[in-house]
Amino acid sequence: QVQLVESGGGLAQAGGSLRLSCAASGRTFSSYGMGWFRQAPGKEREFVAAISWSGGSINYADSVKGRFTISRANAKNTVLLQMNSLKPEDTAVYYCAVDLKLTVVAEIVAGGYDYWGRGTQVTVSS
């Protein structure tokens, strides 16, 4: 049974930082790509960041480039999302996901992911 559990969400002020963590279990995730998506109220789920199994391919949404950093610790089956210079428009539920395709490319499409966590709320106040 694959499980993904996000943590680290909460309330931050604009300009502040948060670090999200996603703990994976049920498989050895070092062979698979991981991604972060977010969904704000009344909006579609959108891509945030993704990292390939090796870390050699990383993609970011234009809206978070230069502010967010995705990384992974394969020995711990964990993927992190460091979020700096937060803006109110970053407010959303953040989800991590795993891509079970054996590929070197960091997937940016939600439909390309196989398992999802339940999400963690991030709220940024102005």
Image: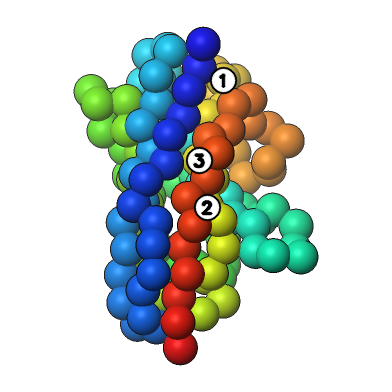
Q: What residue type is labelled 3?
A: Cys
Position of residue 61 measured from the top left corner of the image (x, y, whole percent):
56, 61
Q: Which residue matches tag 1?
A: 100
Position of residue 77 measured from the top left corner of the image (x, y, whole percent):
32, 25
The circle drawn on residue 45 is none
User: Residue at position x 52%, y 70% from top?
Assistant: 90
What kind of element bears circle 2?
A: strand
Disc 3 and disc 2: Cα gap in Å?
7 Å
| Residue farthest along the bottom direction in this orientation | 126
User: Residue at position x 23%, y 23% from top?
Assistant: 75
Disc 3 and disc 1: Cα gap in Å?
13 Å
Position of residue 76 measured from the top left corner of the image (x, y, whole percent):
24, 26
Position of residue 4 measured from the top left corner of the image (x, y, whole percent):
46, 29
Depth check, front residue: 98 or 12: 12
Q: Which residue matches tag 3?
A: 96
Q: Nearer the viewer, mark 2 or mark 1?
A: 2
Depth check, front residue: 7 or 63: 7
* CB contact under 8 Å: marks 3 and 2: yes
Q: What residue type is labelled 1?
A: Leu
Q: Residues within 10 Å of mark 1 (few under 14, many from 20)?
A: some
The colour scheme used here is rainbow
Q: Nearer the viewer, mark 3 or mark 1?
A: 3
Q: Residues within 10 Å of mark 2 (few under 14, many from 20)?
A: many
Q: Which residue matches tag 2?
A: 94
Q: Is residue 43 visible?
A: yes
What kind of element bears circle 1?
A: loop
What kind of element bears circle 3?
A: strand
Q: Which amino acid does label 2 sit on?
A: Tyr
Q: Residues within 10 Å of mark 3 (few under 14, many from 20)?
A: many
Depth check, front residue: 3 or 36: 3
User: Residue at position x 76%, y 65% from top?
Assistant: 42
Depth check, front residue: 84 or 62: 84
